[in-house]
Amino acid sequence: MILKRKFFCHSKALISAQAQIGERTRVWAFVNIADGAVIGQDCNICDGCYIEKGAVIGNHVILKNGVNVFEGVTIEDNVFCGANTAFTNDRNPRAVRRDPWVLEKTLVKTGASIGSNAVILCGVTIGQYAVVGAGAVVTKNVADYEIVAGNPSRSLGYACRCGRKLSADYDCAACRKQYRLLDNQLRLKE
């Protein structure tokens, strides 16, 4: 009996039989998805991505070409990762270890966008709808809606859910959403 896959898989992709991949997800050429990786529905995993065992990717996630997602990294729903985004899971890497390895987990929350060639060090959380600029090196947590860029990354203000930079009054000129800063956290006005 031949089981029909409920996701698209390019003929040149390597996908472990023990990987979990949701319906309508598209996996393109030269992607390598290891045993124990979990990928949600309606994702687009572009050429040359590597997804290691223990990595968890939500629904409606886009990984552009060459993104590496290692064990301990969780990417929630509706996240965009630009080409060659690199996640780490070892703050003190060594080819030969004498001490036990410590996995440091990384979380990318719903709606965040990460620019091409960004490096995300392990042990950080990137907040909901945050924007990480291209080439940024993220060494500490990024707040919800915060925009960061540079090496090491630094705050450049806040972004709307639509992705545009907010004014000094936390208003979006593009979609007209308004936000407020409450207890040092940006919140959408309802």
Image: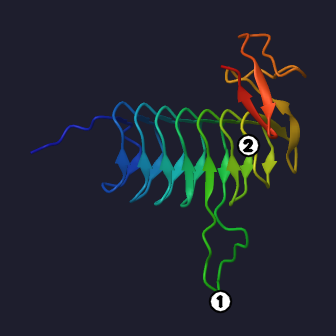
Image coordinates of residue 22 in percent, x first then y, are 36, 39
Which one is earlier in the sequence, the residue at label 2 or at label 1? 1
Asked whether 181 or 74 is in front, the reply is 181
Q: Amino acid at mark 2?
A: Asn
Image coordinates of residue 122 in percent, x first then y, are 68, 60
Q: Could you tell me which quadrant the C terminus lies in?
A: top right
Q: Is residue 78 left or right of residue 136?
A: left
Residue 133 in sight from this viewpoint: no
Extreme residue toward the left, this view? 1
Residue at (72%, 68%) from the top-left corner?
A: 91
Residue at (39%, 37%) from the top-left corner?
A: 10
Label 2 sits on a secondary structure element that is loop
Find disc 2 in the rendering and name its residue.
117
Residue at (53%, 51%) from the top-left corner?
A: 50
Image coordinates of residue 61 in percent, x first then y, are 52, 35
Residue 71 vertical position relative to residue 110 in the rendered view, above or below: below
Image coordinates of residue 95 in percent, x first then y, are 66, 78
Residue at (54%, 46%) from the top-left corner?
A: 49
Find disc 1 in the rendering and name its residue.
98
Q: Could you tell me which quadrant the N terminus lies in?
A: top left
Kindly indicate whether the residue at mark 1 contacts the one at mark 2 (C-beta within 8 angstroms). Answer: no
Asked whether 105 or 47 is in front, the reply is 105
Residue 80 in sight from this viewpoint: yes
Q: Amino acid at mark 1?
A: Arg
Mark 1 Cα shell of 10 Å, populated few (<14), some (14-19), many (≥20): few
